């Protein structure tokens, strides 16, 4: 069985789970519960990590730059193009679906992240010396510059990693490890609190799965799978 076929089988098993078949209200409650866990628990150590975990030169290292670009959207546009070119000679329909998933998931994650930042309005750690600070609505109401919750790099990285993990399930841990590494560099650089990247990881993963599931349902309706 190919990686693509294995990914489809794995997605089918997930599609059959209760949480994905439940109504919108139930799924929303599940998501809110996860947000409380992913944000609430990390907030207990946000200040401690700010004081004890810093590597200001992280992006001056080769590995640091590598991990950061996992959260840079153009990285995944290039990957989507390469994926389509590789798979198009086998099954053009599947190749197109995989490539579009890799285009849409991180793009949607980035957009949703910007909206969440504008709503939550928590500032970056260094602005307030490691303390939480929130920007008032009368101050740059439509600018996300200097806002940190959630981490956009992390959301983009995890959304893309989730799509890749479904396409190539045999190496799923590699994609998630790269995404987690991207998140870690944001904390080490003091660009984000741990809770910023944890919430970003949760929403990025959720968006990745949502895009993957929606595209599979559309493909089934068309008789493509």
Image (tube, grey):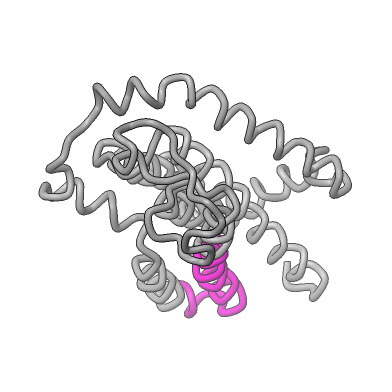
State the count of labels. Answer: 0
Determine whether 90 is above or below 17 in the image.
Answer: below
Asked whether 46 or 27 is in front, the reply is 46
Determine whether 176 is above or below 42 in the image.
Answer: below
Furthest-front residue in this view: 138
* Residue at x 50%, y 43% (from the top left corner): 201
Q: Is residue 136 left or right of residue 191?
A: right
Q: Is residue 193 visible?
A: yes
- At which x and y percent is residue 24? 85, 49
* Residue at x 30%, y 28% (from the top left corner): 50
- Asked whether 179 falls inside the magenta stretch, the response is no
Asked whether 55 or 16 is in front, the reply is 55
- At which x and y percent is residue 124? 37, 45
- At which x and y percent is residue 174? 38, 43
Q: Is residue 59 left or right of residue 143?
A: left
* Residue at x 72%, y 43% (from the top left corner): 13
Q: Is residue 82 left or right of residue 168?
A: left
Looking at the figure, which quarter contains the C terminus? bottom right
* Residue at x 64%, y 54% (from the top left corner): 8
Determine whether 114 is above or below 59 in the image.
Answer: below
Asked whether 156 or 35 is in front, the reply is 35
Q: Is residue 2 visible?
A: no
- At which x and y percent is residue 157? 42, 53
Q: Quadrant of residue 18?
A: top right
Question: Which residues lie in the magenta part?
Answer: 87-109
Predominant SS along the magenta part: helix
């Amino acid at each position: 069985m190919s990686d693509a076929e294995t990914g489809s089988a794995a997605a089918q098993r997930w599609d059959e789970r209760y949480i994905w078949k439940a109504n919108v209200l139930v799924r929303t409650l599940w998501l809110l519960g996860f947000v409380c866990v992913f944000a609430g628990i990390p907030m207990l150590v946000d200040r401690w990590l700010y004081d004890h975990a810093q590597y200001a030169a992280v992006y001056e290292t080769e590995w640091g730059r590598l991990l950061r670009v996992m959260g840079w959207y153009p990285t995944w546009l290039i990957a989507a193009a390469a994926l389509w070119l590789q798979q198009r000679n086998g099954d053009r329909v599947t190749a197109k679906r995989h490539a579009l998933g890799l285009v849409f998931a991180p793009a949607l994650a980035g957009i949703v992240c910007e909206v969440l930042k504008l709503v939550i309005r928590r500032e970056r750690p260094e602005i307030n010396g490691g303390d939480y600070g929130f920007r008032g609505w009368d101050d740059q109401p439509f600018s996300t510059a200097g806002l940190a919750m959630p981490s956009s790099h992390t959301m983009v990285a995890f959304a893309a990693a989730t799509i890749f993990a479904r396409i190539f399930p045999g190496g799923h841990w590699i994609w998630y490890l790269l995404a987690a590494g991207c998140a870690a560099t944001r904390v080490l650089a003091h660009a984000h609190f741990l809770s910023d990247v944890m919430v970003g990881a949760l929403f990025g993963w959720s968006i990745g799965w949502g895009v993957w599931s929606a595209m599979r349902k559309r493909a089934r309706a068309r008789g493509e799978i």
